[in-house]
Structures are given as structure tokens and as C-alpha cells.
């Protein structure tokens, strides 16, 4: 488990102040793949960099199960080990200043990968992966065995003597993942690790992260600005905006019932139904004063019901389907339809109300 409490960070420069994190609270359970999405500048990188203390927050608490709690006050870090939990669950340990030794222990627990891989260009794949194993008390033979084991894990054994310039983007990211896992961390932070990759390489890296999550019981915190990535692999997701987490939930929850406008935009960006907004802008001729265009999202409670034909009969309105999609998220169906509802205004409104009462999320796109 990782828990962040009231984490804040402001960057100060001669040009002024930037509040990058403002009272962020977040809890990630062991073994989860946890997505954090947000537009550029939302504070995502700052958040993960604060989590492993690459960046020192101004204030807040960071608890990593199996390690302890770091409390930051006015930019100063204090540490309380976990091994001092009292009978009532309270932490009875002495708080001390955070030392280099504590930091090293934290970084061993928390590996990290980046968008641009950060490999050593003049070193081979072997040397890149071996790098974090230096000075850990292992013999040469032990290091060699560990590197080969890691390369096998990321399916890159045949590239052991290659240089980064001889690898594709996806292969470079595999090297970076092997390097991040060298000291067997329990948590992996991934900051836009697939943003520089083509769709095929993205898919294979995401698959690898899922595999590692299962095989090694690795907790993954995955920063991205692409909702498709969240949809593909995450269990839960948090949406960040201007240094705050504005929405959080299971991936299914967030996709089926987004509560914030920004989340709605993110969700729309990966849904086939998102295209309707562009379509509507192009051509409105087909909508008459007797029409309403609605976008409906059917979640697991409503997806099986024959609601469209039911509504049509019940209220005497015509329902024309413009666009439709269905997908399986976290093993559950999530369906969407864009419909043109034709009929007298009061009947159209009654039909929409009826759909809403039956757990369909209805957005009115155009009311003719
Ligand atoms: N070292 C720094 N000095 C000053 N300001 C910074 C620094 N790092 C980040 N910022 C500012 O803090 C805010 C949050 O930046 P951050 O890099 O965390 O965003 P992000 O969500 O990761 O964005 P992106 O998607 O573009 O990577 C931005 O306004 C950024 O300009
Ligand atoms: Mg970033």
C-alpha cells in the first residue's frame, strides 16, 4: 500500500510561483495498476517524483507499506519506520530526520521508467541493466545471472550485447524496465512510458507491465495523458487537474459515470461516440425542430435491457441510431448509443427521463 496525504509542492522562481501539487490525497493498494491522467502541466510528473522523493514536497505525508512514513514539513523530511506499530495500530516509533540510508531503501522499493528511456548510450544493454546492481555487494557472477534473468523477463535476451542505438523504441523501454526492476522493487512508477512509442510497441509494453504486475505482484503507478492506456491496463484511475486530484475510482466506474467535465472529456477521447461532437459540427441539416439528439451510456445495470424499443413503444417516439459501440472494461460491458429521438417535445423529454431512471447516462447533444 502507498498512501499520500495532503501532499503539496510549489515551484518558486524569479518569474513567480507555480503550484504543482495542492493537498493531494491518494491511496494505492498493493498489486494494483493505478492510472493517473491529466493534461500537460496538471502535476502528474511532480506527483510521482515526490513519491520517491526525487523531488522534495513542501508538506505532506508519504507512507509506503513495508518501508515506513516520510512526513514533510516546510520542505524538511522526517522518517518513521513501519516496524514500530503499537498494539492499537498506532505508530509508536521515534521520528528521526530522513537520511541518505532511508532514501536509498525507499528507492530500492520504488523503481521508475520514463518516456525517453534514459539509457546510457555508450553502454550495452547488459551494462545498462547491470548499472543499479553495482555496489550492492553482489559478485560479478551474481550480477551476470541477475541481468540475464531480467532480460529474459522482458523478452530481450538476444539483445544483451547491443547498444541502445541499435534498438527500437519498444526494445529500449524493455531495457529501461529491466533496469528499473534490477533491485526487485515492489512498486514501479511509469511516467509516460509509452508516449514515445507507436501503437504496436505501446501495446506490447502495456502487456509486459500487466505480466510483471501479475508475475511479480508488482504495484504499478502509471502516469499518462491517454485514456486508452488507462482503459487497457488499469484497475483504478485518478484524474488530475491543476495540482489536484479531481476524480478517482475504478476504471469501470469512471468510464461509465464520469463526474467532472475534464473526466468526461478524457473518457470521450477514447470512445467511438466521442466522434459525434465533430460530426454535429459539420452537418446539422438532418435535425429538424422535432428531433433531439442524445448520447446514451449503458453500464452493467442497463446494458442487457431492450430499452430503446421499450421507450419507443411506451412514449410513441422514433429512435434512430446514429452511432453505437460496446466494449468490455474490467470484464463488464459498457455500451454507448447516439440516438435521434423524433416526436412531440413532451414525449421526447419523457423518454429521456425514463432512460435516466433506468440507469442510462443521457447527454443531450442537440435539442431541435
Ligand atoms: N523544476 C520545475 N521548476 C519550475 N516549475 C516546474 C518544475 N517542474 C514542473 N514545473 C511546473 O509545475 C507544473 C506541473 O508540472 P508537471 O511536470 O508535474 O506536469 P505534468 O502533468 O507531468 O505535465 P506533462 O503531461 O506535460 O508531463 C507545470 O506548470 C510545470 O511548469
Ligand atoms: Mg509529466
Image: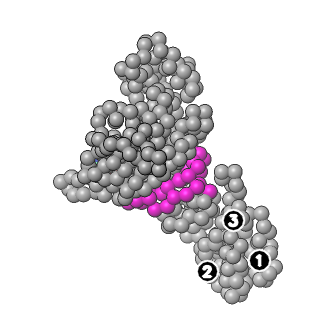
Q: Is mark 3 within 8 Å of ligand 1?
A: no
2 or 3: mark nearer the eye = 3
Count neighbours of disc 3 (C-alpha within 10 A) and say few if under 14, some if 14 to 19, many if 20 or more. many
- The residue that disc 2 covers is 367
Q: Quadrant of residue 215?
A: top right
The answer to which quarter of the image holds residue 152 is top right
Q: Secondary structure at mark 2?
A: strand
Whole-percent x and y of residue 35? Answer: 51, 49
Quarter of the image that includes the C terminus: bottom right
The residue singled out by tag 3 in the image is 298
Alpha-carbon span between mark 2 and mark 3? 21 Å
- Quarter-of-image position of residue 79: top left
Q: Along the polypeptide, which appears first: circle 1 or circle 3?
A: 3
The residue furthest front is 87
Depth check, front residue: 296 or 293: 296
Mark 1–mark 2 distance (CA, rounded to whole Å): 18 Å
Residue 311's label in the rendered image is: 1
Name the spot of residue 172 as percent of width and height, x first: 48, 30
Amino acid at each position: 500500500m502507498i498512501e499520500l496525504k495532503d501532499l503539496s509542492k510549489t515551484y518558486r522562481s524569479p518569474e513567480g510561483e507555480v503550484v504543482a501539487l495542492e493537498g493531494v490525497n491518494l491511496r494505492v493498494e498493493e498489486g494494483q495498476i493505478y492510472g493517473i491522467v491529466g493534461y500537460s502541466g496538471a502535476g502528474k510528473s511532480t506527483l510521482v517524483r515526490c513519491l520517491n522523493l526525487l523531488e522534495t514536497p513542501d508538506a505532506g505525508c508519504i507512507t509506503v507499506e513495508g518501508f515506513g512514513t516520510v512526513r514533510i514539513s516546510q520542505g524538511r523530511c522526517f522518517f518513521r519506520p513501519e516496524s514500530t506499530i503499537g498494539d492499537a495500530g498506532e505508530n509508536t516509533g521515534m521520528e528521526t530526520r530522513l537520511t541518505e540510508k532511508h532514501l536509498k531503501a525507499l528507492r530500492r522499493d520504488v523503481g521508475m521508467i520514463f518516456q525517453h528511456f534514459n539509457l546510457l548510450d555508450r553502454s550495452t544493454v547488459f551494462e545498462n541493466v547491470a548499472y543499479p546492481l553495482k555496489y550492492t555487494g553482489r559478485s560479478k557472477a551474481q550480477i551476470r545471472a541477475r541481468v540475464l534473468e531480467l532480460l529474459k523477463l522482458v523478452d530481450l535476451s538476444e539483445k544483451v550485447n547491443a547498444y541502445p542505438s541499435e534498438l527500437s523504441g519498444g526494445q529500449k523501454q524493455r531495457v529501461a524496465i529491466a533496469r528499473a526492476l534490477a533491485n526487485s522493487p515492489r512498486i514501479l512508477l511509469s511516467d509516460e512510458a509509452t508516449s514515445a512509442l507507436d501503437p504496436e510497441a505501446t501495446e506490447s509494453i502495456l502487456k509486459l507491465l500487466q505480466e510483471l504486475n501479475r508475475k511479480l505482484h508488482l504495484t504499478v503507478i502509471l502516469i499518462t495523458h491517454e485514456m486508452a492506456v488507462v482503459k487497457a491496463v488499469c484497475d483504478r484511475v485518478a484524474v488530475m487537474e491543476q495540482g489536484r486530484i479531481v476524480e478517482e475510482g475504478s476504471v469501470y466506474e469512471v468510464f461509465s459515470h464520469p463526474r467532472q467535465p475534464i473526466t468526461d472529456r478524457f473518457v470521450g477521447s477514447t470512445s467511438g461516440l466521442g466522434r459525434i461532437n465533430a460530426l454535429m459540427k459539420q452537418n446539422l441539416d438532418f435535425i429538424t425542430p422535432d428531433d433531439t439528439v442524445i448520447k446514451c451510456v449503458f453500464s452493467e445495470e442497463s446494458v442487457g435491457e431492450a430499452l430503446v424499443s421499450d421507450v419507443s413503444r411506451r412514449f410513441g417516439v422514433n429512435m434512430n441510431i446514429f452511432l453505437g459501440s460496446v466494449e468490455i472494461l474490467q470484464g463488464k460491458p459498457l455500451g454507448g448509443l447516439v440516438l435521434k429521438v423524433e416526436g412531440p417535445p413532451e414525449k421526447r423529454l419523457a423518454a429521456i427521463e425514463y432512460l435516466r431512471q433506468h440507469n442510462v447516462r443521457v447527454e443531450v447533444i442537440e435539442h431541435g
